[in-house]
Image (cartoon, rainbow, N blue to C red):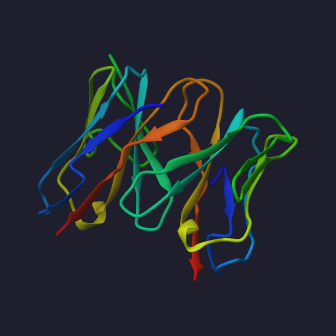
Amino acid sequence: TQLLEQSPQFLSIQEGENLTVYCNSSSVFSSLQWYRQEPGEGPVLLVTVVTGGEVKKLKRLTFQFGDARKDSSLHITAAQPGDTGLYLCAGSRAGNTPLVFGKGTRLSVIA
Amino acid sequence: SAVISQKPSRDICQRGTSLTIQCQVDSQVTMMFWYRQQPGQSLTLIATANQGSEATYESGFVIDKFPISRPNLTFSTLTVSNMSPEDSSIYLCSVRRANTEAFFGQGTRLTVV
């Protein structure tokens, strides 16, 4: 059972377009994190959202945590080829437990 | 944050042999985690490496195949034993402090021929 459903799995868009990636669960998480991974590297943290309804912005990236802390979204405005990579959402429960990862979204931005 | 050094970064191994992957953290952490990532896929947790006790394995992973050591609070190893081509994957170590984000090593890309 996949506790975190991430969609879409693959996304290929033209430079300048906008996109949204979704991460949904039936479980409540104490926080949710978004990572970006490039080939040959480990995942790198983009943002952590903690409070229900929270919105965080990182340049052209906007992250939102659902009011019930069960879902999250990542919106990229005016995508650039440098945004290409694997985006992973990960849910955290309290304490020092391992993260629960979504299946990932492989984004390709074509110039 | 935490800086994690993982080695080797890649290796090509003969089937039937074993490979030990090392993970060194720049600060003490209670728990370290080992993940496997198939090409183009997300991360699958193999086990949690606990200092001072045996590792805790996830369903589908066993100690005989993936023995783990955790001699101190900054170091862990994962061994992939009796390898087959199906073990070809990226292996990642990760650390996480209570209620914080996770940090990852750069991964070990293993190819079994």
When asked about the image quadrant of residue A88, the answer is: bottom right
* Residue B55, picture quadrant: top left
Q: Residue at x 29, y 60 (%)?
A: B87
Query: Could you tell whether A96 is left or right of A77 in the image?
Result: left
> Residue A29 at x, y = what percent?
72, 37
Q: Is residue B62 above or below residue A6?
A: above
Which residue sits at x=65%, y=79%? A15
Q: Nearer the viewer, residue B64 or B8?
A: B8
For residue A30, above or below residue B98: below
Q: Is residue B54 above or below residue A72?
A: above
**Residue at image coords 59%, 77%:** A109
Pick out the residue farthest to the top. Answer: B52
* Relative to A13, B30 lies left or right: left
For the residue pair B67 and A82, the one nearer the viewer reads as A82
**Along the line of sight, which residue is nearer the eye, A91 or A12?**
A12
Q: Quadrant of the C terminus of chain B?
A: bottom left
Q: How many marks?
A: 0
Residue A85 in picture, x, y percent from top left: 52, 66
Residue A70 in picture, x, y percent from top left = 78, 45
Q: Judge left or right: residue B30 versus residue A1.
A: left
Q: Quadrant of residue A51?
A: top right
